[in-house]
């Protein structure tokens, strides 16, 4: 810069003028419309589709928007939604994890076995299977060290410790064991994809079949592990917060969102950086409050049909999903790790030349996906109160991938958010629940769900083509 000294903001404007151009509300709206025309649709199609589906099922079924069904809908879709949140990390790299569903089933089987066998995994698995299981965990820990994925190594070793200790059954210990086993599975998957160089489709397809066999080995053909008698495990998907706790959650969610959004907005204004107009920022906060406050009020009403039983409060799955949403969004948007994921997903070669360890990033997303899948397994196992040989199988994976894609995450990599998995998961949950209330057969449910996923993939492909043309 030349001439006399200027204030910091003026210097920033001079050097980065395009990043500091102020926008009026009208200009911001016009800019958003231009991005939509250019193919940057984000989660808008899914949000509009969700609204349309809610209206359709509301009209067709008297029981759809009842309090009991709404709470049940949230619990029904939470397991697959959580798995989808982890898969977003994999999809951002343009990869796929077809084994996430059955991997979650393995985690659920180990968790349930630890409970029903009173912590004696050796007795539950048998000598040979148990030592192969422990050996696999140790190998995963070693591979994680080689790839410098320290969290994966620690979690795998924790699983070894729990397995060898024979600790008495404890719901929190069993849930930790499930997550640790999921992390170990993700390490193995990530190593095969990133270090061996095998296509993720081939690796995860093979592991999909492998983990199905492992589940069957653990549980037995026709067997089942019941966890419905364990109060904490059962309450994960079936319990509700207190009325006071529900309002506290509402206040924390709305207030926290307002503090983060306004804080960032004011910070960017003070630095002279580009930011959305203040009315739009305030409108977003109001929109969140308009959704959260009435929903909390409604869920705090007694929704029991039995005069002698009171069922009220926000289901526990809601704060679980919210915590994962905040954590995943923060990791992708606010950390160097998240920026590296988007960079590798956008252009792996450019990322490598910029000094990013592409191999490590590629391996780590599978650890995130499998660990999150274990959390999904805890939720869906809690919902049904048991774990059987079909855990994580059937349509679990397809619905999880579908949720991420329907919500707006691109199958081509480089574009997506954890929030997309939540929106897409709600869409699939509404379809499944609504068609169930209309007493439609499984064939119709599968056909409709498949068509919704096909439509989402088509929108993704067309929007990318339009974005390429507009450039």
Image (tube, rainbow, N blue to C red):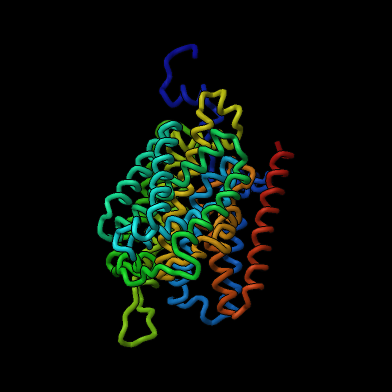
Outermost residue toward the front in this view: 127
Outermost residue toward the bottom in this view: 307
Where 400 falls versus 138 (above or below)? below
Residue displayed at 36% across by 86% down: 306
Q: How many marks?
A: 0
Q: Is residue 294 visible?
A: no
Q: Which of 49 and 449 is in front in this view?
A: 449
Where 138 falls versus 12 (above or below)? below
Where 20 falls versus 56 (above or below)? above
User: In the figure, is residue 129 to the left or right of 342?
Assistant: left
Q: Is residue 226 visible?
A: yes
Residue displayed at 62% across by 40% down: 199
Return the x and y of residue 101 as percentages of the image width and height. Answer: 52, 56
User: Residue 135's quadrant in the figure?
Assistant: top left
Return the x and y of residue 259 as percentages of the image width and height. Answer: 36, 47
Return the x and y of residue 239 as percentages of the image width and height. Answer: 34, 69
Outermost residue toward the top in this view: 3
Q: Nearer the viewer, residue 451 or 118?
A: 118
Return the x and y of residue 179 as percentages of the image width and height. Answer: 39, 51
Q: Nearer the viewer, residue 13 or 128?
A: 128
User: In the figure, is residue 75 to the left or right of 451?
Assistant: left
User: Residue 252's quadrant in the figure?
Assistant: bottom left
Residue displayed at 46% across by 44% down: 367
Quarter placement of the C terminus: top right
Outermost residue toward the left in this view: 168
Residue displayed at 62% across by 56% down: 45
């Amino acid at each position: 810069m030349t001439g006399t000294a200027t204030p910091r903001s003026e210097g920033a404007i001079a050097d980065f003028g395009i990043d500091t151009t102020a926008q009026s509300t009208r200009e911001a709206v016009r800019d958003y419309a231009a991005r939509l025309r250019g193919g940057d649709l984000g989660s808008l199609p899914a949000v509009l589709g969700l609204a349309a589906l809610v209206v359709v099922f509301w009209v067709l079924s008297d029981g759809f928007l009842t309090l009991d069904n709404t709470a049940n809908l949230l619990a029904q879709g939470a397991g697959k939604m959580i798995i989808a949140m982890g898969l977003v990390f994999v999809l951002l790299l343009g990869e796929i994890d077809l084994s996430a569903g059955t991997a979650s089933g393995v985690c659920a089987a180990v968790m349930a076995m630890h409970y029903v066998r009173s912590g004696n995994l050796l007795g539950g698995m048998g000598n040979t299977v148990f030592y192969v299981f422990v050996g696999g965990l140790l190998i995963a820990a070693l591979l994680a060290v080689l790839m410098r994925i320290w969290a994966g190594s620690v979690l795998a070793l924790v699983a070894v410790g729990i397995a060898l200790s024979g600790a008495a059954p404890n719901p929190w210990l069993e849930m930790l064991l499930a997550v640790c086993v999921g992390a170990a599975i993700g390490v193995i998957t990530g190593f095969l994809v990133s270090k061996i160089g095998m296509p993720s489709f081939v690796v995860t397809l093979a592991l999909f079949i492998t983990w199905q066999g492992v589940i069957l080995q653990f549980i037995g053909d026709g067997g089942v592990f019941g966890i419905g008698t364990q109060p904490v495990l059962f309450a994960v998907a079936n319990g509700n917060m207190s009325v006071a706790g529900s309002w506290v959650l509402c206040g924390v969610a709305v207030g926290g969102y307002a503090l983060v959004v306004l804080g960032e907005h004011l910070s960017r204004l003070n630095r002279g950086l580009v930011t959305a107009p203040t009315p739009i920022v305030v409108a977003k906060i109001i929109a969140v409050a308009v959704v959260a406050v009435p929903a909390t009020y409604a869920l705090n009403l007694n929704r029991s049909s039995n005069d002698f039983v009171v069922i009220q409060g926000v289901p526990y799955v809601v704060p679980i999903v919210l915590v994962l949403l905040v954590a995943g969004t923060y990791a992708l948007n606010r950390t160097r790790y998240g920026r590296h994921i988007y960079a590798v997903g956008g252009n792996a070669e450019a990322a490598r030349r910029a000094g990013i360890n592409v191999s490590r990033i590629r391996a780590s997303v599978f650890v995130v996906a499998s660990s999150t899948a274990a959390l999904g397994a805890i939720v869906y196992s809690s919902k049904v109160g048991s774990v059987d040989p079909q855990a994580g199988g059937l349509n679990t994976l397809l619905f999880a991938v579908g949720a991420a894609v329907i919500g707006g995450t691109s199958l081509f990599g480089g574009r997506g958010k954890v929030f997309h998995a939540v929106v897409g998961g709600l869409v699939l949950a509404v379809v499944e629940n609504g068609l169930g209330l209309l007493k439609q057969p499984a064939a119709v449910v599968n056909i409709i769900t498949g068509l919704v996923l096909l439509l989402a993939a088509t929108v993704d492909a067309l929007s990318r083509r339009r974005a390429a043309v507009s450039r």
